[in-house]
């Protein structure tokens, strides 16, 4: 294994090891502060981070507003307060070592307002901002205003080219690095484009080589690229070190820091990570963002998959092959379906899936009455956690809607991520993870259920393992 040399990022020499930011209290001040104290870059999540009461207990993020707009304002207030709290914790734990970054999802509700609020309230405590989940054109201008470095997350050279030409070229001095997030291997939301096949992963090397060529074209050849997604043993990436085609490079770890003493996730979640097998992480498109995402297969994902499989097209009147009448709902309203789909629907109804919910695509899905009630309740209780949500049809526009019908094939992402972050319920909630998470069970470092401190993990990583 080649020597792992320090690299300058966010104004200081650090180990080229970055903690990946994981939203809704999964990367917090404690985990990121410990990573920075170990000499790397710690990243806490600015996505609805926790605040604490006088006894150190997380303050439940409860919503009292009668309208979505009112609840959206409450959500932004929670996010700013929590982000400032976690920045202070991270700063104290780091003890002046490493660097502290905050991770913001551009498509989260009120992203710009939340970022301004955190950087205003935690002046001097945050050294960089990583930002993805969309095309964050304005992140450069915002970071330059506060004198912090920005780290856009992209999955292709083409995406960075668009960002640079539209906005970043005016704030080149504050570009800290570019995060290349592998859209097939990274955990959480992934940046797969419509032209890329989710079933056919591509080698990241030529994609990062193209990104480096683009950076050089724009006079930014000195700017590091951070490889994110699929990184486990650094010895597997040794040919990237001191490589003229790749240039200065660092590596982001999102999944491995989950299994540390400082990680705030539940013990049940940590035990589950040690049990994963190859294929247990599922690339899916159920997210209300519309993005692909990678999460652990569990009853939560299975129910979403089954929900979409119990789906048929319909018309309001007889049309073409839609010539068979189907009565749905308590009032027995008539829709028209094909004879084959009528047989499917009749079977689902007989099995107890008696609620037919309409989707924006002119289809019906069939769920049991309890699930139907829960879906409608979650849609009504929307607090605008995304800039636009296909599940509830919220959008942070003047109209307050994306203009489409709510989509019952999706789910309330805020609700499930808050629940899994603050409880032991790992079966009925969304559990994000990278596709390499099965390696916890194969890596001898974690033998006999060993859970390291962040310091121990970083030391292990620097050996190549």
Image (cartoon, rainbow, N blue to C red):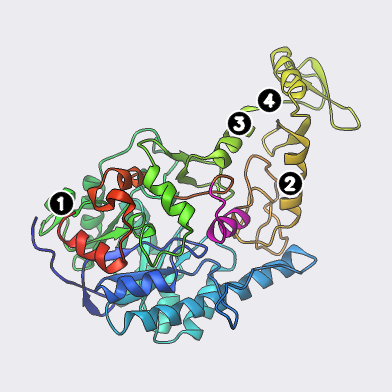
Left/right of residue 374 with respect to residue 221 in the rendered view? right
Q: In the rendered image, which quarter is residue 217 located in?
A: bottom left
Q: Choose between 256 and 43: the one closer to the eye.
A: 256
Q: Are marks 2 and 4 in contact (CB under 8 Å)?
A: no
Between the C-alphas of marks 2 and 4, the distance is 21 Å
Residue that carries the numbered disc 4 in the rendered image: 312
Residue 22 point in image, percent of width and height: 44, 60
Q: Choose between 57 and 447: the one closer to the eye.
A: 447
Q: Residue furthest front?
A: 448
From what the image shows, is residue 296 above or below residue 208? above
Between the C-alphas of marks 4 and 1, the distance is 49 Å
Q: In the rendered image, which quarter is residue 247 located in?
A: bottom left
* Predominant secondary structure, magenta span: helix
Left/right of residue 40 with respect to residue 6 in the rendered view? right
Secondary structure, mark 1, is helix
Q: Which residues are magenta?
A: 414-426
Residue 362 point in image, percent of width and height: 70, 32
Q: Is residue 423 magenta?
A: yes
Give the residue at x 62% y 44%: 410
Residue that carries the numbered disc 2 in the rendered image: 374
The C terminus is located in which quarter?
Answer: bottom left
Question: Can residue 129 be seen by looking at this rendering?
Answer: no
Q: Is residue 288 magenta?
A: no
Give the residue at x 25% y 41%: 203
Left/right of residue 218 with respect to residue 419 in the rendered view? left
Q: Which mark is residue 235?
A: 1
Secondary structure, mark 3, is helix
């Amino acid at each position: 294994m080649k020597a792992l040399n320090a690299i300058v990022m966010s104004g200081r020499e650090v180990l080229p090891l970055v903690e990946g930011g994981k939203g809704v209290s999964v990367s917090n001040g404690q985990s990121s502060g410990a990573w920075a104290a170990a000499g790397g870059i710690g990243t806490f999540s600015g996505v609805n981070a926790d605040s604490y009461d006088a006894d150190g207990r997380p303050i439940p993020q409860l919503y009292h507003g009668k309208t979505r707009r009112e609840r959206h304002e409450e959500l932004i207030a929670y996010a700013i307060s929590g982000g400032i709290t976690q920045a202070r914790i991270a700063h104290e734990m780091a003890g002046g070592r490493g660097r502290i970054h905050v991770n913001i999802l551009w498509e989260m509700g009120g992203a710009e307002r939340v970022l301004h609020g955190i950087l205003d309230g935690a002046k001097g405590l945050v050294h960089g901002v990583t930002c993805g989940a969309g095309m964050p054109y304005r992140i450069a201008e915002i970071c330059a205003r506060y004198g912090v470095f920005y780290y856009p997350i992209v999955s292709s050279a083409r995406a960075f080219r668009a960002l640079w030409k539209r906005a970043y070229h005016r704030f080149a001095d504050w570009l800290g690095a570019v995060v290349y997030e592998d859209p097939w291997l990274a955990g959480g939301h992934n940046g797969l484009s419509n032209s890329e096949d989710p079933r056919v992963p591509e080698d990241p090397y030529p994609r990062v080589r193209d990104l480096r060529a683009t950076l050089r074209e724009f006079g930014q050849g000195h700017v590091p690229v951070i490889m994110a997604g699929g990184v486990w043993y650094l010895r597997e990436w040794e040919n990237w070190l001191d490589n003229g085609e790749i240039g200065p490079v660092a590596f982001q770890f999102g999944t491995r820091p989950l299994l540390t003493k400082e990680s705030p996730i539940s013990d049940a979640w940590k035990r589950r990570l040690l049990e994963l097998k190859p294929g247990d992480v599922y690339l899916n498109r159920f997210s209300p963002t519309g993005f692909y995402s990678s999460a652990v297969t569990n009853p939560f994902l299975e129910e979403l998959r089954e929900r979409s499989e119990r789906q048929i097209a319909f018309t309001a009147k007889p049309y073409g092959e839609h010539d068979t009448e189907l009565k749905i709902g308590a009032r027995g309203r008539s829709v028209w379906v094909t004879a084959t789909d009528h047989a499917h629907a009749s079977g689902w109804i007989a099995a107890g899936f008696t609620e037919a919910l309409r989707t924006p695509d002119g289809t019906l899905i069939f769920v049991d009455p309890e699930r139907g009630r829960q879906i409608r309740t979650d849609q009504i209780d929307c607090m605008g956690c995304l800039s636009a949500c296909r599940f509830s049809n919220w959008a942070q526009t003047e109209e307050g809607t994306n203009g489409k019908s709510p989509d019952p094939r999706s789910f309330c992402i805020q609700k499930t991520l808050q629940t899994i972050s603050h409880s032991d319920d790992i079966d009925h909630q969304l559990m994000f993870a990278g596709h390499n998470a099965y390696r916890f069970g194969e890596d001898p470092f974690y033998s006999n259920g060993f859970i390291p401190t962040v310091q121990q993990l970083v030391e292990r990583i620097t050996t190549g393992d």
